Amino acid sequence: MKIKMRYEDAYQTLEVETKEIEKWLNISIIEEESQEDYEKRIQEVIEERFNRPDYNSWHKHDRHTGNAYMKCKDGTVEVNTEEAIMFRAADKSAFYSSINSVHNQIEYEEYCEILRSLLKPEIADIVIAIALDDMSVGEYAELIGDDSNNVSHRYRRAIKKLKKV
């Protein structure tokens, strides 16, 4: 079967097998439908989904960059000169939050590994909870069921040992 696909400003004819195009477009043959009607229906779906005029593709890409043209009711054309919304953001870190969270998780795991290699396991847990996880000494002592004075003392000794290293 031959289909017409728009590429830039011209159409190109592609030859595709019917079974492949059915899967690609998620279309099935209706039993009473002739082959010509079926090919016509496939081409209509391709026109609707993929062969839109270049303006639609350009507008979809460019509508938030400040270059979009707006047509008023009286027929005049205005150019949107505002900057894109994402460029006006005060804190651009929101656009990179997923990357930053992965980077922070990798750093956290490296620090935990270093602490566990230098300290005893239970002391390393205290340092990780208090220094890295921002728990207070009292909260951690309550969590493990120990006196906060003992936990504080172990924590200070661990910090002193880490400073030597």
Image: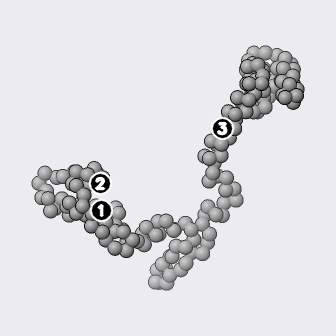
- Which residue is disc 3 drawn over? 106
C-alpha span from label 1 to label 2: 8 Å
Mark 1 in CB contact with mark 2 (< 8 angstroms): yes
C-alpha span from label 3 to label 1: 45 Å
Q: Which mark is residue 25?
A: 2
Residue at 46% of width from left, 80% of height from top?
Answer: 73
Q: Amino acid at mark 3?
A: Ile
C-alpha span from label 2 to label 3: 41 Å
Q: Nearer the viewer, mark 3 or mark 1?
A: 3
Q: Earlier in the sequence, mark 2 or mark 3?
A: 2
Residue 42 position (above or below residue 139)? below
Q: Amino acid at mark 1?
A: Ile
Q: Which mark is residue 105?
A: none
- Which residue is disc 1 drawn over? 46
Relative placement, left or right, of 79 versus 91 is left
Q: Quadrant of the C terminus?
A: top right
> Callout 3: helix, strand or loop?
helix
Q: Amino acid at mark 2?
A: Leu
- Label 2, residues with CA under 10 Å away: few <14, some 14-19, many ≥20: few
Q: Earlier in the sequence, mark 1 or mark 2?
A: 2
- Label 1, residues with CA under 10 Å away: few <14, some 14-19, many ≥20: some
> Callout 1: helix, strand or loop?
helix
Residue 51 position (above or below residue 92)? below
Relative placement, left or right, of 47 versus 19 is right
Colour scheme of the picture: one colour
Residue 43 in view, yes or no: no
Q: Earlier in the sequence, mark 3 or mark 1?
A: 1
Residue 62: x %, y % from top left? 51, 68
Residue 164: x %, y % from top left? 88, 28
Residue 153: x %, y % from top left? 87, 20
Mark 3 in CB contact with mark 1 (< 8 angstroms): no
Residue 69 in view, yes or no: yes
